[in-house]
Image (tube, coloured by chain):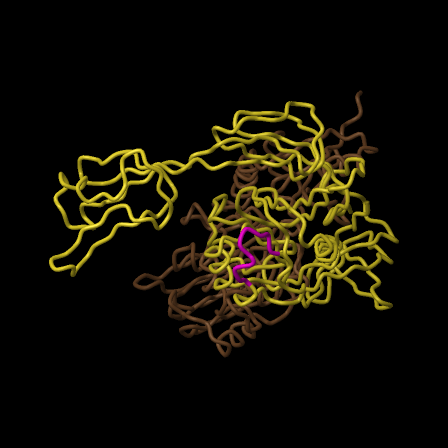
Chain colours: A brown, B yellow
């Protein structure tokens, strides 16, 4: 019987090339760290040489076919979750996009001028593989990506966020920026599941899923939280399966984090404008976040501090 | 992890330089011929065209009567500022005069009362300005393979231009409007950590050929238009923002002040032909990549956006979380006895010729 073959997936991105080695049963083998290198022809040669001792079947992803692989992953995740999910690629290709940088400034925690932000983005366009050198640059990069990414399906029930920035330590600040993204793409009154690809593995998973169509253990795509947007606030009740319902008022411009146990089923009731809605979610990650901010809600340092405190101000993943 | 090796300044490089030949000039060299800086590549009489002067309108006379007011005959040569036509007013008052704006030859009076003047042919000589070999002769240009010193930038805009190199600012300084005067016309200006809108506009107005600077604000750079040409060429050596030009680029260029150079905004470089008969091996490409190792000399920007050069003293095998939350492979670089931890991806191995 022939020996089953390993898979080496080399994902050629806009700024980095990533290599993932999978076992024949699709387990990620280079778990300590996927091997990454700035994008160049030599980078691909370097990575494949580095891993060729495994005698793996080499599968290469280029920008051209990335959308297809992300679609495969999206289909797989949606089917598994029983909800329609959308994969959003926050990769370095977004640096090509022109966005209104002025809108980012209020969310950057240090005082900076628009010129500094413009120059930062300009330099990233020259050398997209370089990394933020301090917290301010990390803020600028995270803000840029989460403002530049666009969702195509506005009626889906969740997102999977992929891209190098999600490898970094995610805290209250990053979660707040993710909430801003959700605010800009999803309707009010939807329970949105948020997943994060912490290894930039989405395209590689998608390729394997598309080619083999078998159920596999999903690693490195973790649930961050369930988010309910309730513009202007309201009243939300939760049924954790205990004797009593827990009721929480959510004020206008307020964010509430309700921690819940891993894989705990929670029934949620709330009133959306004119009708009562009841839904249930399986909690994991941070838990359930209720975002009562209005679309017009403009941040100032006091509000920013309040929102960050509501989100715990701690590291999530 | 592999790191980029960046070539910033090359003392000897071979390059192809295109010399444009104006139409009408006769070629004096052929393919394969060796040339010196003073070698004439082409010469001839070149006319830059013709010009119409609205004599009837300026004098306020009927267009059919313009001939009566001419002070020169058709076919006659005329020099700049010479009187072409004149109308005396009543009692000697209100005299109107038309002077020639150019050196030329009167061709005809047109039906609308204008005078057609053809520019006088100018003697043109195109010299090689570099030492090398004629690699190709195309319709309107001659390509010379030559030996140059070359400074490499990271961004640029504008077509290939040529001019005498002039240093106008030290690496840490701004190129100020006041530093650009008439003496900068037709020159390639070098220096500075940044240049502002006023200085750029003045450079354009005075006919500066090109500017090589350390940094420039990204918004200013974008205002040049992508892949367009505003009338001079710009090369940025470090990046966007206030970024002092690296000494590794500034010092060798400074030594070539007064030399003839070629600035290329499309390929972000400044080439300075080597005028001696020295020959050099062709260098490697601008970029290559090597696996980072301890002892490598590397360049990076510090937090104050200054270009620093240090030595790798340790390399992480695995990704780590930095103090500000970034997950990546970190390295330790020693610089003036101090050790700095930073993302390996931000290091560039120093290229040495």
Regarding residue B217, the answer to whether it shows in the image is yes
Image quadrant containing the C terminus of chain A? bottom right
> Is residue A226 or residue B273 the one in the foreground?
B273
**Above or below — where is B203 with respect to A211?**
below
For image coordinates 23% across by 45% down, the residue present is: B54
Q: Is residue A143 above or below residue B42?
A: below
In which quadrant will I find the N terminus of chain A? Answer: top right
Outermost residue on the top side: it is A1
Q: Residue at x 48, y 62 (%)?
A: B197
**Compared with residue A189, is residue A17 higher up or lower down, i.e. above or below?**
above
Can you give x and y, in whole percent of width and height, for residue B255 in the image?
74, 55
Please state which of residues A65 and B309 is positioned toward the viewer in this rendering.
B309
Q: Is residue A141 within the magenta segment?
A: no
Image quadrant in which you'd find residue B48: top left
Residue B156 x/y as whole percent: 57, 49
Report whether B101 appears left or right of B280: left
Measuring from the top left, give residue B131's x and y in whole percent: 71, 36
Q: Can residue A83 be seen from the camera position used here?
A: no
Q: Of all residues shown, which one is farthest toward the bottom?
A: A302
Number of callouts: 0
Q: Is residue B251 left or right of residue B224?
A: right
Q: Position of residue A91 (x, y in %)?
A: 58, 48
Residue range corresponding to the magenta coloring: B180-189
Q: Nearer the viewer, residue B238 or A52?
A: B238
């Amino acid at each position: 019987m022939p020996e089953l073959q390993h898979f080496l997936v080399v994902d050629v991105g806009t700024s980095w090339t990533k290599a993932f080695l999978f076992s024949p049963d699709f387990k990620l083998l280079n778990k300590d760290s996927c091997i990454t290198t700035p994008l160049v022809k030599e980078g691909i040669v370097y990575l494949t040489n580095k891993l060729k001792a495994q005698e793996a079947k080499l599968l290469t992803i280029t920008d051209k076919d990335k959308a297809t692989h992300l679609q495969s992953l999206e289909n797989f995740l949606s089917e598994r979750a029983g909800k329609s999910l959308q994969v959003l690629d926050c990769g370095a290709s977004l640096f090509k996009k022109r966005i209104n940088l002025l809108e980012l400034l209020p969310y950057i925690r240090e005082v900076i001028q628009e010129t500094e932000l413009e120059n930062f983005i300009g330099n990233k366009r020259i050398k997209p593989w370089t990394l933020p050198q301090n917290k301010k640059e990390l803020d600028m990069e995270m803000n840029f990506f989460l403002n530049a990414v666009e969702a195509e399906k506005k009626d889906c029930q969740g997102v999977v966020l992929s891209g190098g920035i999600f490898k970094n330590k995610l805290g209250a600040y990053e979660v707040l920026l993710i909430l801003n993204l959700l605010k800009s793409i999803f309707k009010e009154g939807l329970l949105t599941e948020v997943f994060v690809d912490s290894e930039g593995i989405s395209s590689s998973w998608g390729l394997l899923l598309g080619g083999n169509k078998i159920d596999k253990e999903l690693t490195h795509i973790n649930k961050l939280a369930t988010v309910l947007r309730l513009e202007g606030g309201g009243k939300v009740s939760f049924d954790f399966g205990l004797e009593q319902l827990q009721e929480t008022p959510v004020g206008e411009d307020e964010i509430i984090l309700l921690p819940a146990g891993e894989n705990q089923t929670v029934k949620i009731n709330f009133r959306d404008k004119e009708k009562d809605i009841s839904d249930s979610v399986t909690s994991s990650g941070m838990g359930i976040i209720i975002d009562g901010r209005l679309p017009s809600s403009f941040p100032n340092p006091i509000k920013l501090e309040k929102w960050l405190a509501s989100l715990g101000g701690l590291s999530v993943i | 992890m592999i790191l980029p090796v960046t070539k910033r300044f090359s003392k000897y490089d071979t390059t192809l330089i295109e010399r444009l030949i104006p139409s009408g000039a006769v070629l004096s060299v052929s393919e394969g011929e060796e040339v010196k800086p003073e070698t004439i590549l082409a010469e001839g009489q070149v006319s830059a065209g013709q010009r119409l002067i609205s004599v009837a309108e300026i004098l306020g006379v009927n267009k059919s009567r313009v001939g009566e007011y001419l002070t020169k005959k058709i076919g006659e040569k005329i020099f700049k500022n010479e009187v072409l036509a004149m109308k005396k007013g009543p009692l000697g008052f209100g005299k109107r005069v038309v002077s020639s704006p150019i050196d030329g030859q009167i061709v005809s009076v047109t039906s609308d009362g204008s005078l057609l003047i053809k520019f006088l042919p100018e003697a043109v000589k195109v010299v090689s300005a570099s030492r090398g070999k004629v690699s190709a002769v195309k319709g309107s240009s001659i390509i010379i393979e030559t030996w140059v010193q070359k400074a490499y930038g990271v961004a640029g805009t504008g077509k290939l231009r040529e001019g005498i190199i002039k240093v106008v600012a030290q690496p840490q300084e701004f190129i100020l409007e006041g530093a650009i005067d008439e003496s900068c016309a037709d020159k390639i200006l070098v220096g500075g950590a940044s240049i502002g809108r006023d200085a750029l506009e003045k450079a354009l107005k005075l006919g500066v050929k090109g500017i090589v600077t350390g940094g420039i604000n990204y918004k200013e750079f974008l205002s040049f238009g992508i892949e367009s040409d505003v009338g001079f060429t710009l090369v940025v050596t470090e990046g966007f923002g206030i970024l002092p030009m690296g000494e590794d680029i500034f010092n060798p260029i400074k030594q070539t002040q007064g030399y003839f150079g070629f600035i290329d905004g499309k390929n972000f470089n400044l080439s300075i032909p080597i005028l001696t008969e020295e020959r050099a091996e062709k260098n490697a490409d601008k970029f290559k990549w090597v696996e980072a190792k301890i002892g490598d000399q590397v360049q990076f920007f510090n937090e104050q956006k200054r270009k620093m050069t240090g030595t790798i003293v340790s390399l992480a095998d695995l990704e780590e979380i930095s103090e500000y939350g970034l997950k990546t492979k970190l390295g330790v670089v020693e610089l003036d006895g101090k050790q700095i931890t930073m993302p390996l991806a931000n290091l560039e191995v120093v290229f040495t010729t």
